[in-house]
Amino acid sequence: MIKDENNLDSYFFITKNGRWDGFISVDVLKNIPIKKWDLKIVSEFNKSINNFPSIFENAPLWQIIEKIEKTNEGLILITNPYGIPMGFLDRKNIGLFVLKKLGFNISNEILNKIKSKSNYPLGIELPKIIKLMKSKGDI
């Protein structure tokens, strides 16, 4: 289950024969009355993994950021070149990666205070930086 720390969005990811098959939003499950839980099966609510926002692992960082910005949750599935899911990235992780590459080592204490995965840490504006770089022809 992937769940953001603000409890805004949650997903259960479904596997079939050891392969990622789909996902279910917790919001869908919340709408099922408890009395009907024994009558419902997962496949009734399973959405194809292909419907989850994703990008190949070898994509440039700026393209990954643009793709994340097109999602509501700020969460993206990273796949290998064969389309097999590798893991997830969110704004917080990308922001921390960029800060580390710039030489900023954030302490664990500060990391623990950065609760939101739906925002870039320390207010860095990566989408604006990408837009500026595109306008200058750098990317």
Image (cartoon, grey):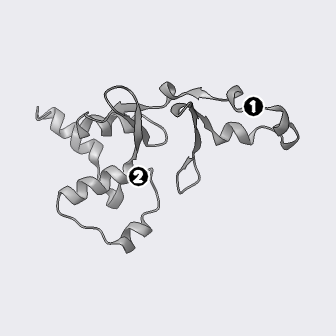
Residue in view at x 41 percent, y 52 percent:
119
Badge 1 marks a residue whose secondary structure is loop
Is 98 situated left or right of 28 in this image?
left
Q: Check if mark 1's residue and mark 2's residue have beta carbons within 8 Å.
A: no
**Is label 2 in a helix, a strand or a loop?**
loop
Front position in the image: 107 or 39: 39
Could you say where residue 23 lies in the image, as x and y percent from the top left? 58, 34
In the image, what residue occupies the spot 31% across and 28% down?
Answer: 81
Q: Mark 1 to mark 2: distance in Å?
A: 34 Å
Badge 1: residue crowd in 10 Å (few <14, some 14–19, many ≥20):
few
Q: Is residue 83 above or below residue 90?
A: above
Q: Nearer the viewer, mark 1 or mark 2?
A: 1
What type is the residue that disc 2 sits on? Answer: Asn
Q: Residues within 10 Å of mark 2 (few under 14, many from 20)?
A: some
Q: Quadrant of the C terminus?
A: top left
The dot on residue 41 is 1
Quarter of the image where one finds residue 83: top left
Location of residue 59 with respect to 100 vertically, above or below: above
What residue do we see at 38% from left, 74% from top? Answer: 109
Q: In terms of sequence position, does the residue under pointer 1 or pointer 2 come before the other?
A: 1
Q: Which mark is residue 63?
A: none
Is 26 displayed left or right of 98 in the figure? right
x%, y% of residue 128?
26, 43
Q: Position of residue 59 (x, y in %)?
A: 26, 33
Q: In the displayed structure, does residue 95 sit left or right of residue 132?
A: right
Which of 36 and 72 lies nearest the eye of the viewer? 36
Please state which amino acid type lies under the numbered disc 1: Ile
- Indicate left or right for 73 with 42 as reference: left
Disc number at residue 119?
2
